[in-house]
Image: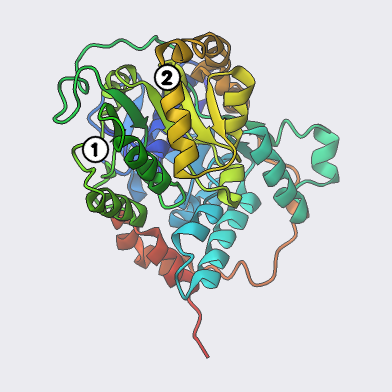
Amino acid sequence: MRKKTLIISSDIIEAKMAGPGIRYWNFAIELSKHTDVTLLCPNECTLDAKFSIKQISLPTLKEELKTADSVILQGVTLWQYPFIKKAKVPIVVDLYDPFMFENFEVEKDSVNVNQLHLSSLTIILDQLAAGDYFICASEKQKDLWIGMLTAINRINAKEYKINSSLEHLIGVVPFGITVDEPIHNKNVLKGVFPGINQDDKVLLWGGGIWDWLDPITAIKAVHVLSLKRNDIKLFFMGIKHPNSLVPISKKTLESIALSDSLNLTNKFVFFNEWVEYDQRQNFLLESDIGLNVHENHIETRYAFRTRILDYMWCELPIVTNNGDIMSELVEKHNIGEVIHISNENNLASTLELMLDKNVLTNYKNGFKKIKDIYIWENCISPLKEFCMNPVKSHGKSQMLKVKGLYNVNYIRLQKLYKYILKGDFRIILKKIFEKKTT
């Protein structure tokens, strides 16, 4: 008899989706081949699917938990719906996004940065305490989470006795690549988008402009190039999150202001609202280079830049700087160039060299192997195995509690639901753990 898998997306599932929605949409597609899937999401989804999609609500979630054999969740979902922990359903905690490191960048100028970090850490520790199985996006992330699980004694003699490699407790499930080859079915950029000519070279920024990334250096590099040639254009695929309740990032505003001040906007630098998920290949296939530019800090070390998988899918040569798992893949498989000293002049010279047609051709051979590794069907294998044979963890009883990090007021959290709907998680974290200043 097929098991029933309940998947809870923390982000909207619709024609336009951001990373969490894309991940959970593909989870549902792949797992539905092996189990009966119900996908819950914050919005009323209009996409066609071969599995059940429902808008999340308290009654719906409680009803679905009654028959679920396992539940997959991420982010603040467990704190928003704490009764999940009492449902006696094995919980899969998705740790692909170590958001406590992202929040260092988002909140670094806040007077409450220490309290906000404590809030993020508490949410993470609550997940580590509640989960029966954990997934993450890379081996590097796995080492991070094994360290944290060990620190609270979730990795203990009972778990070790079951499987000394801990494969029953944590698995690597990265973002994946669509198995179907990309098909260009609509002209969207060259000779179509105002300001981008048919013969221009397009540098593509494949996802959103988040505060922990470095679009500033990319814009400055384009400015350097614009002083000597007029055919290199930078296109940001999305500056407006598909969830209208999520505010525009500070780094987006800084990027637009910089581009305006250098007189680049709509001439050399273009800011698009957001691209529909099933149209993204048209933008990728019309581009010449995919950009992944970030600052080298702790978030970078454990990040997994999800939209770079789309670069790989469309065999778009990548320019990135070092410090993350993706730069290691780019170098290993020779699918682009890694900049080890990040500044606008180095980036500009690397881009100009790569845009020579013969040079771009050299990167094509490395894509096939990496695409085979990262197709969704292969990526999801550890999660599929657990959902087909879900079990509760035997080692939870041995867990240590960290003083001062479990004073959770769930009633107060429910009162903050309006902030969740607005997507303003910074306010949520601040309100939960805000301390009186002395």
Q: Is residue 411 visible?
A: no
Q: Element at badge 2? A: loop
Instruction: Kindly identify the amino acid type of the residue bearing the numbered disc 1.
Output: Phe
Res. 384 image quadrant: top right
Q: Residue at x 58, y 32 (%)?
A: 327
The one nearer the camera, 82 or 365, is: 365
Res. 427 image quadrant: bottom left
| Residue 274 appears left or right of 395 | left
| Residue 369 appears left or right of 280 | right
Residue at image mark 2: 316
Instruction: Kindly identify the amino acid type of the residue bearing the numbered disc 2.
Output: Leu
Which quarter shows the N terminus? top right
The one nearer the camera, 358 or 365, is: 358
* Vertical relation: 327 (above or below) 254: above
Q: Element at badge 1? A: strand
Q: In the image, residue 310 lies at what x, y percent?
A: 42, 24
The one nearer the camera, 129 or 270, is: 270
Furthest toward the front, the residue is 228
| Residue 234 appears left or right of 273 | right
Furthest toward the bottom, the residue is 438
Q: Residue at x 32, y 55 (%)?
A: 254
Residue at image mark 1: 270
Mark 1, residues whose alpha carbon is within 10 Å: few (<14), some, or many (≥20)?
A: many
Q: In the image, residue 332 lies at what x, y percent?
A: 64, 21
Q: Is residue 334 visible?
A: yes
Mark 2, residues whose alpha carbon is within 10 Å: few (<14), some, or many (≥20)?
A: many
Q: Residue at x 44, y 53 (%)?
A: 81
* Vertical relation: 361 (above or below) 130: above
